[in-house]
Image: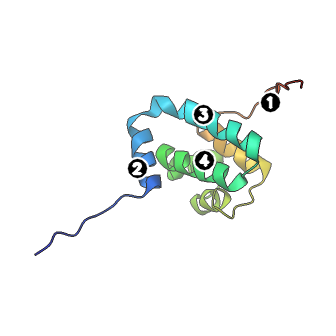
Amino acid sequence: MTEKRIYKTLDESEEEYYRSHPDEIDGYLTTAFEEYAKDGCTAALLAQLRMIARVKGISALAQETGITRNGIQKALSENGNPKFESINAIMHAMGYRLAPQKMEFTKN
């Protein structure tokens, strides 16, 4: 009899990695927001936030933000269109804040 292989998705592998290396989440989120600033891909940013939210615990975030588990999952879904207040609350519950950073422009 052949053993059935179980494969992990990339999301599952990333989530497992950041559970084991929580000290690297800061850099991951910084890069996620830098990439969003360059390409404006909301779906990619929400996917990255969704993965970190799972690492931090959706139930804990729901309790701290007052947003339901389903509400957090919906806000951070591929087709999510979350309110600014929701993203701000989720970021705060994960231990981060949204802060402006001056952009550097290069002259040609």
| Badge 1 or badge 3: first in the primary sequence | 3
Look at label 1 and name its amino acid: Pro
Q: Nearer the viewer, mark 4 or mark 2?
A: 2
Relative to 15, 34 lies left or right: right
37 up-or-down from 42: above or below: above
Mark number, residue 47: none
| Badge 4 or badge 1: first in the primary sequence | 4
Q: 89 or 79, which lies in front?
A: 79
Cα separation between marks 4 and 2: 15 Å
How far across and how far down the image is residue 86, in percent? 72, 50
Cα separation between marks 1 and 2: 31 Å
Q: Nearer the viewer, mark 1 or mark 2?
A: 2
| Badge 3 or badge 2: first in the primary sequence | 2
Q: Name the residue under label 2.
A: 13
Say whether marks 4 and 2 touch (CB < 8 Å): no
How far across and how far down the image is residue 64, in percent? 60, 44
Q: Mark 4 points at which residue?
A: 49
Q: Name the residue under label 3.
A: 95
Q: Pointer 1: residues within 10 angstroms few (<14), some, or many (20+)?
A: few
Which residue is depicted at the point 63% across and 33% down?
A: 30
Can residue 66 be spotted in the picture?
no
Q: 103 or 81, which lies in front?
A: 103
Q: 83 or 10, which lies in front?
A: 10
Q: In which quarter of the image is residue 2?
A: bottom left
Q: Name the residue under label 1.
A: 100
| Badge 3 or badge 4: first in the primary sequence | 4
Q: Which quadrant of the rendered structure holds the C terminus?
A: top right
20 up-or-down from 43: above or below: above
Q: What element carries label 4?
A: helix
Q: Which quadrant of the rendered structure holds the N terminus?
A: bottom left
Q: Which of marks 3 and 2 is in front?
A: 2
Q: Pointer 2: residues within 10 angstroms few (<14), some, or many (20+)?
A: few
